[in-house]
Amino acid sequence: MESQPETPKPLQRRPWLDLMRMLAAVWVFLFHFAREHPVFQTWPWRYVAASGAWGVSFFFMLSGYVLMRQYGPKGQFSIDVSSIGLFYKRRLLRIAPVYYATLFVFLFFNFFVLSEEPPLKAVFLHLLGIQAWFRDYALSLNFPSWSLSCEAFFYLTFPLWVKIFRYFPDNIRSECARWGWLLPMVWCACGIEKWLGLYHPITNLPLFISGIFLALYRGPMIWPAAMAFLWLLMGTGLPYDMWRLCESNGVSASPVFACLILVGARGAGKVAQLSDVCRILGEISYPFYLGQYLSFLITKYLYWQFFHPLWKGFHAGHIFLINTCLALIFVFCVERPLRRSF
């Protein structure tokens, strides 16, 4: 008789995970605001800025990896009906407070500072967190929040994937773990993006599933490292404009993401001494990502009016400063108090 699984314990803080979250958020920030800076027009920095959108795709895979490591250690899957409510509660407390806080601040700023009335349908879709399902509204209002619409769908379906993988034979799991990083590349090659759009949850779902597969991988690092190196070698051999066009939002860059995640997980002890710093970075990474466009508006229409005589020009560094401060405010004034309450 199969023993009843225990309720999973809260995921312990891992310095490497917190650090990767922040690096992914900064990577996306560079893509949006620093790619026009002269420094980012030189090699190799222009590739860093141009590929910054990959940070979102990387995080989708990282989410699948982390959740499966928590709920499926060593293939013994431990999420069931008795713990599914707790799982959803934790996910909701993780994404909802900052998501709605940034949305309401954005709407307030949009209405009272810019005197613009947002479309009611866009507001309705954002309140439900389903804007990414509609091509015309995925990037409406606070546009970075499209990825949270995808994450909400991934979290909602995660127990289903666990239920399915629980009954996979060991040899099938092993092959999925070894070749799972191919799934986003195959999915991208099928042209799903053209039909559904780049930001649709179904377009990005293979990244999340490949992260689940990756969590089951127990082989040597040489295999994913070789695949990532081969992929980079092929990619950087293309002309710059073609390289950007082909890689799109990084859906096909899954070999690189898989290698980075495994390197971080297996070298976690190297950053253990920086655990406190990484913990803070991990906490602010989410609001740092979600508030970047809001920080751009604040910098352009408020902050810049006072400091423009001191600093000539419009630099991404000022947005970075405001965005970091805003992220700290959201963490200490919104996320932490609500987590303590529940």
Image (tube, helix red, strand yellow):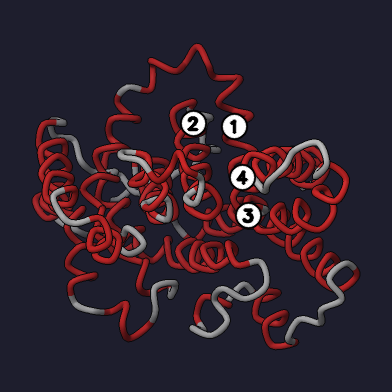
At label 3, the amino acid type is Leu
At label 1, the amino acid type is Leu
Q: Mark 4 sits on what residue?
A: 316
Give the mark toward the camera: 3 or 4.
Answer: 4
Q: Residues within 10 Å of mark 4 (few under 14, many from 20)?
A: some
Give the mark toward the camera: 1 or 4.
Answer: 4
Determine the residue positioned at 74% across, 59% down.
Answer: 297
Distance from the alpha carbon under mark 1 to that under mark 2: 6 Å
Determine the residue positioned at 24% across, 38% down.
Answer: 259
Distance from the alpha carbon under mark 1 to that under mark 3: 14 Å
In contact (CB < 8 Å): disc 1 and disc 2: yes
Whichever of callouts 2 and 3 sits on the residue coming sooner in the sequence is 2
Asked whether, in this view, residue 300 is left or right of residue 262, the answer is right
How far across and how far down the image is residue 289, in percent?
59, 50
* Element type at mark 4: helix
How far across and how far down the image is residue 75, in percent?
26, 44
Q: Mark 3 sits on what residue?
A: 290
* Element type at mark 3: helix
Whichever of callouts 3 and 4 sits on the residue coming sooner in the sequence is 3
How far across and how far down the image is residue 334, in percent?
80, 47
Is any part of residue 145 visible from this angle?
yes
Q: Mark 2 sits on what residue?
A: 19
